[in-house]
Image (cartoon, helix red, strand yellow):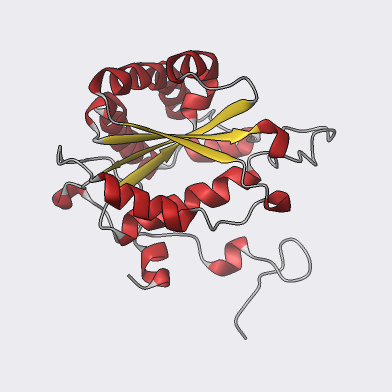
């Protein structure tokens, strides 16, 4: 698949068939995703492939704990790092409710997804350069999520659907015990992988225009092609 096509047609898949994903396909995805960039080329990402039903069920249960809280806040328009004005705007944005409904379906059927990937990172490989700033840190996961994005694009190239969620990170203590993760490794994401149910796989994506999210020299000055 051509790269730009993959980037433009890779939505979060919420509905999967029960068809298994072959180990060689997953290995091919990882074999290419591992060329992602990372700070100091430390390559601190680590991924656990989960296919056993009982383990998937436990991960789904842990995810559900956080999803129930998230969806309650989202419906009230209070999810995220937002001003009061932004919260009000989000609450009145009706497509959000439709997305929440689809994601609720996803959360309730997570244990049936063929493959769950628990994406982790070795903490010693991270340089959290914004840790002393008077706001929430966003930099620490940078060396994990380049790899994660490559995995998502690799899934698209293989004709697989995927969905990324970070809610499981809030249940790290339980996940660590369940998957025997070392103390110096953090849980950063969960990726659901499987064959998409075609009639519910949305590949026509809409996004904000470049000029709204990319700026020229100063924040707020739109960057244009001209």
Query: Residue 100 placed where, x, y %?
Result: 35, 34
Q: Is residue 34 left or right of residue 156?
A: right
Q: Residue furthest bottom?
A: 226
Is residue 128 visible from the viewing direction of this image? Answer: yes
Query: Residue 145 placed where, x, y %?
Result: 56, 46
Is residue 137 visible from the viewing direction of this image? Answer: no
Residue in the image at 30% along x and 45% along y: 13
Query: Residue 61 placed where, x, y %?
Result: 35, 16
220 in relation to 200, above or below: below
State how many labels appear.
0
Residue in the image at 31% along x and 39% along y: 98
Q: Is residue 210 left or right of residue 50?
A: right
147 in relation to 3, above or below: above
Q: Quadrant of residue 5?
A: bottom left
Q: Nearer the viewer, residue 124 or 141?
A: 124
Residue in the image at 42% along x and 40% along y: 164
212 in relation to 50, above or below: below
Q: Quadrant of residue 65?
A: top left
133 in relation to 11, above or below: above
Q: Quadrant of the N terminus?
A: bottom left
Query: Residue 174 placed where, x, y %?
Result: 48, 13
Q: Quadrant of residue 192?
A: top left
Q: Quadrant of the C terminus?
A: bottom right
Q: Nearer the viewer, residue 28 or 167?
A: 28
Residue in the image at 23% along x and 51% along y: 201
């Amino acid at each position: 698949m051509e790269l730009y096509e993959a980037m433009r047609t890779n939505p979060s898949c919420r509905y999967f068939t029960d068809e298994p994903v072959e180990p060689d396909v997953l290995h091919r995805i990882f074999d290419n995703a591992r060329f992602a960039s990372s700070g100091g080329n430390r390559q601190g990402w680590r991924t656990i492939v989960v296919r056993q039903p009982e383990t998937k069920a436990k991960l789904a249960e842990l995810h559900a704990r956080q999803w129930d809280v998230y969806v309650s806040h989202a419906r009230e328009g209070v999810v995220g790092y937002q001003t009061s004005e932004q919260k009000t705007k989000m609450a009145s944005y009706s497509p959000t409710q439709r997305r929440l409904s689809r994601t609720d379906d996803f959360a309730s059927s997570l244990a049936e997804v063929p493959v769950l990937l628990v994406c982790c990172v070795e903490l010693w490989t991270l340089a959290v350069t914004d840790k002393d700033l008077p706001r929430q840190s966003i930099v620490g996961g940078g060396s994990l999520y380049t790899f994660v994005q490559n995995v998502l694009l690799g899934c698209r190239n293989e004709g697989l659907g995927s969905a990324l969620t970070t809610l499981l990170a809030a249940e790290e203590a339980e996940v660590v015990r369940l998957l025997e993760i070392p103390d110096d490794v953090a849980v950063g994401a969960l990726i659901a992988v499987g064959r998409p149910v075609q009639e519910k796989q949305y590949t026509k994506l809409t996004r904000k225009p470049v000029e709204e999210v990319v700026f020229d020299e100063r924040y707020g000055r739109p960057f244009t092609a001209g």
